[in-house]
Amino acid sequence: MNNLRSQNAFAFMLCGCVLLSATGCLSGSLATSSGGTDGGTWSIAKRQSIHVGETVEFSFVLKKPLSNDSIDAGGIADYCAFSIGGNRVEAELDETGGFKAEYTFSGVEDGAQIAVAASAFSTQDDRDFMQISGKWLQTESPYNKPDRRVASASVTLTVYQSIVRFKLPKPEDAYDLGTGKLTFRCAEDRLVSVFEHRPPRVGFEISDENADGSRWVAYLPTGDQLNPTGTTEVEFSIYDVAGNRMTFTDTIETP
């Protein structure tokens, strides 16, 4: 009899959790397009690395109670608010039943720690915030019922900056410096070309000759010029005044 009562009690609690899932039993999962994806599309690691200037996609889904299975948020949540380093980005429910947003991390510094939180909400009256002229303004009406938070999740992003450096040995004929080109070879045959720094164009810099006649090429790539994870092949090519083409290659690690 006691076992039967225990089973009935557990079934009642489970049923109640499902029925009242919007009040707290549902959990959320926040994933990014950066970090180690193990060959997949999204990373759910709590701590991830992003490159300066990288454009990162975020995905937030609801999870079943006592399960890792995702569920369609339709009828449960209407929108998701992403707080990205203190900046607010809202996303509507998409056709997959989840929420996606995109953010470019420009103006961030190497070593910075950026907190990202996502919360799905059910709209009650008017939305709590409205974006007007690029600014988020909170609804101040005392008659407006606040939106109900359904589920939340968070990750911490660590910013890093790659450095490209090539040493050009002293040539037999002088380098034709204007012919220099950096090429980043990314996944899916995407090629990114960068040329010498000439404001307003941002590019690599070539040093004056060293004592041994060599030169240094240096460049700080942005995240959108690299693969988000794994490695990126980079090539520097240049001609000398005799028309000979020389190439130098390296591999950049992108964690």
Image (cartoon, helix red, strand yellow):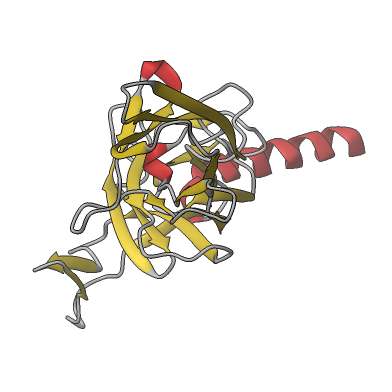
Task: Determine whether 176 is above or below 111 in the image.
Answer: above
Give the residue drawn at x 29%, y 48%: 91
Q: Is residue 200 visible?
A: yes
* Quadrant of the snapshot with the C terminus: top right
Tag count in the figure?
Answer: 0
Give the residue drawn at x 91%, y 39%: 2
* x then y, percent, for residue 44: 59, 40
User: In the image, 88: left or right of 12?
Assistant: left
Quarter where residue 189 is shown: top left
Give the residue drawn at x 48%, y 59%: 117
Task: Determine whether 236 is above or below 117 in the image.
Answer: above
Question: Between residues 52 and 193, which one lies in front from this camera angle?
Answer: 193
User: In the image, 164: left or right of 146?
Assistant: right
Q: Is residue 231 visible?
A: no
User: In the image, 28: left or right of 13?
Assistant: left
Quarter where residue 244 is shown: top left
* x then y, percent, for residue 143: 19, 78
Question: Between residues 240 and 96, which one lies in front from this camera angle?
Answer: 240
Task: Determine whether 184 is above or below 194 in the image.
Answer: above
Question: Between residues 5 and 197, which one lies in front from this camera angle?
Answer: 197
Give the residue drawn at x 17%, y 66%: 130
* x then y, percent, for residue 110: 54, 62
* Quadrant of the snapshot with the N terminus: top right
Q: Residue furthest right?
A: 2
